[in-house]
Image: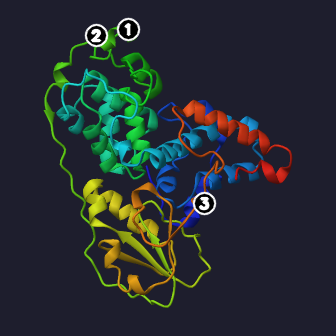
Amino acid sequence: MYFPVKYDEILKRIEAVNPLRYGCTRNFIDGDVTYLSPYISRGVISAKQVAEVMMAKGYALSDMTKFIQELAWREYFQRTWQYLQDDLLHDIRRSYTGTRHRLVPKAMLCADTGIDSIDEAINTLYKTGYMHNHIRMYVASIACNIGKAYWQMPSQWMYYHLLDGDIASNACSWQWVAGSFSSKQYYCNQENINKYTYSAQRNTFLDQPYEELPKMDIPEVLKAVTGFNAKTNLPEANGITIDPSLPLLIYNSYNLDPLWRKDEKVNRVLLLEPWHFRQFPVSDKVIQFILALAQNINDIQVFVGEVSGISHIKDITKIYSKEHPAFVHYPGAKDERDWLFPEVKGHFPSFFAFWKKCEQALKQRQPSASELAVA
């Protein structure tokens, strides 16, 4: 599994997407998924940009509803973070009293759960920084609903390794599975895993009818638990050159857009703040991926330190960044992100309430060819 970092190769990957096949096969381990999530999460491209390419290729919105809906899930999680702010990192809708601990099953960290498809996927995550979305749901269900772990630490473990690690998507997805951001907990059994991973394993702790799973004791293999203490190894701090007479554009690990204000004469700085990575640590593989993607930005300089430490920052009259809940402390103006549905804002108690508004927005775009492009 390979994730190119050059912008022209990323654009080719967008062009190769077939939204119709995606809608039919995305849940299977070998399904026609896009592998665009690392680039959307890191702000190299946007969901809006992807949808517009699909429209330009002649796909009608009515034919790729499932594809657009999956892009909208990501946007829903971002809007949820905007509304909840730091409360996103705590139980959003309800707390389950069935959790037994706030650690991680050791078998999960060691890829030794005994569920072959799960263990293989965990090893793939360590090797590549990617895990299929359906497998992520399986892993979260095993950790939280079978292993009775509170969702926070296992979700931090997964986030640490993901190239597409997105704080909102990761936290909300784990809470959705654990039942703290949904109406019920999500369970998977061995039959379901076998179907979507093309395996034929039997006699595991998940080889049970669905109605038996909530009644189970914690399987022996999941009883040993451990903490997950991770740190981020940031590159060594180097001096950068700032012209205080020019505007300053602040990039970060969630905004690596090479087209952002690309024709303006400005200072361009990728800011890697130690405090952020202490709170949300990521692996060496993720850091190297971020740094490689940043090379698509002309004249980018990397600054390791807090934003207040950027030289001459108090002397610069125009400072810009892109709006993001993790970086509201940046000085200066905040540019709006390229939302898929910019008109759908605010708090929604569920994705489907959010999606109803998105569907209304899509219908309003139908009359003319220019309005059909998702904007």
Establish if 78 lies above or below 307: above
Do labels 2 and 1 touch, CB within 8 Å? yes
Amino acid under disc 3:
Leu
Q: Which residue was labeled with disc 2?
A: 215
* 78 left or right, relative to 304: right
Closer to the eye: label 3 or 2: 2
Closer to the eye: label 1 or 3: 1
Q: Which residue was labeled with disc 3?
A: 11
Q: Of all residues shown, which one is farthest toward the right?
A: 368
- Disc 2/disc 1 C-alpha distance (Å): 8 Å
109 or 322: nearer the eye?
Answer: 322
226 or 366: nearer the eye?
Answer: 366
364 or 54: nearer the eye?
Answer: 364
Q: Secondary structure at mark 1?
A: helix
Q: Residue at x 57, y 39 (%)?
A: 70
- Which circle's residue, 3 or 2, is located before the other in the chain? 3
Q: Secondary structure at mark 3?
A: helix
Residue 213 pos. (x, y %): 32, 13
Amino acid under disc 1:
Glu
Q: How did the renderer colour the structure? A: rainbow
Amino acid under disc 2:
Lys
Do labels 3 and 2 touch, CB within 8 Å? no
Q: Residue at x 38, y 41 (%)?
A: 171
* 352 left or right, relative to 343: left
- Which circle's residue, 1 or 3, is located before the other in the chain? 3
Q: Residue at x 50, y 56 (%)?
A: 39
Residue 139 pos. (x, y %): 34, 31
